[in-house]
Amino acid sequence: MIFERVCIDFAGRLMNLDTMKPGSYKARPLALLVCVLLLAPSLAQAASHRTHGLVLPPGAQEVGEDRYRLPGTYENTLKYFDKAYRGLPQKAIVNQPGIRAMHFESSSAKTAWQGFNVYEKNHEVRIFILTRPAADTPSAKHAKGRSSTGK
């Protein structure tokens, strides 16, 4: 006995699941392609936002130079950075009522950022990115080395 892949539709008719009839379980290739093309840019933008090479959580809004407001809670933000940057040195930097802050230090001299501070005040989470001086970045050292040789 051969088992066929069939189902019963709402009208009580038997339908073969391997056909492209209305109500079929198979996705239509053109509709799938259109959905992917329409959603790809928004998904890529929501997935990550980078500044100075640092990946920020989705939904981060710039509020000033190298300052961002984050939509999540302080604890979730710390979990995000712990997961995104495993082993990054961190230390608590504020010990006052109503304010919490954590400093993350870059473990690589190749990054454009030295570290960043995640802090919460009045139930609002923000991040401040500490950038490296222009002379400390590897590309600036390379450019400086070329200019001193006269090339």
Image (cartoon, rainbow, N blue to C red):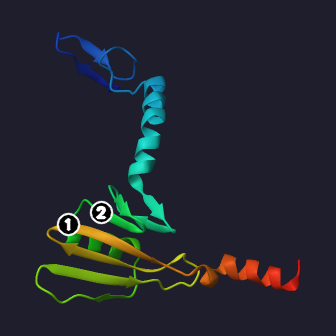
Quick check: 112 left or right of 87?
right
Badge number at residue 134: none
Residue that label 1 marks: 124
Tell whether label 1 touches label 2 (CB within 8 Å): yes
- Tell me the amino acid under the disc marked 1: Glu
Closer to the camera in the image, 64 or 70: 64
* Above or below: residue 96 compared with residue 85: below
Q: CA distance from mark 2 to mark 1?
A: 8 Å
Query: Where does residue 116 sit, x and y in percent of width and height?
Result: 39, 78
Q: How many marks?
A: 2
Q: Quadrant of the C terminus?
A: bottom right
- Which corner quadrant of the image does residue 81 belong to? bottom left
Q: Height in image: 69 above or below 78?
A: above
User: Which residue is rendered at x = 36% and y = 14% of the image?
Assistant: 21
Q: Which residue is label 2 attached to?
A: 69
SS category of the residue bearing label 2: strand
Given residues 15 and 20, the one toward you in this image is 20
Point out the tag, 2 or 1, that comes first from the N-terminus: 2
Q: Residue at x 32, y 55 (%)?
A: 59
Residue situated furthest front in the rendering: 64
Secondary structure of the residue carrying numbered label 1: strand
- Image quadrant assignment for residue 138: bottom right
Report the residue at 35% width, 25% height from top.
2
Q: Amino acid at mark 2?
A: Arg
Label 1 neighbour load within 10 Å: few <14, some 14-19, many 20+: some
Residue 97 versus residue 1: which sits nearer the camera?
97
Where is residue 115 drawn, in percent x and y? 43, 81
Considering depth in this image, is 127 or 32 the residue closer to the camera? Answer: 127
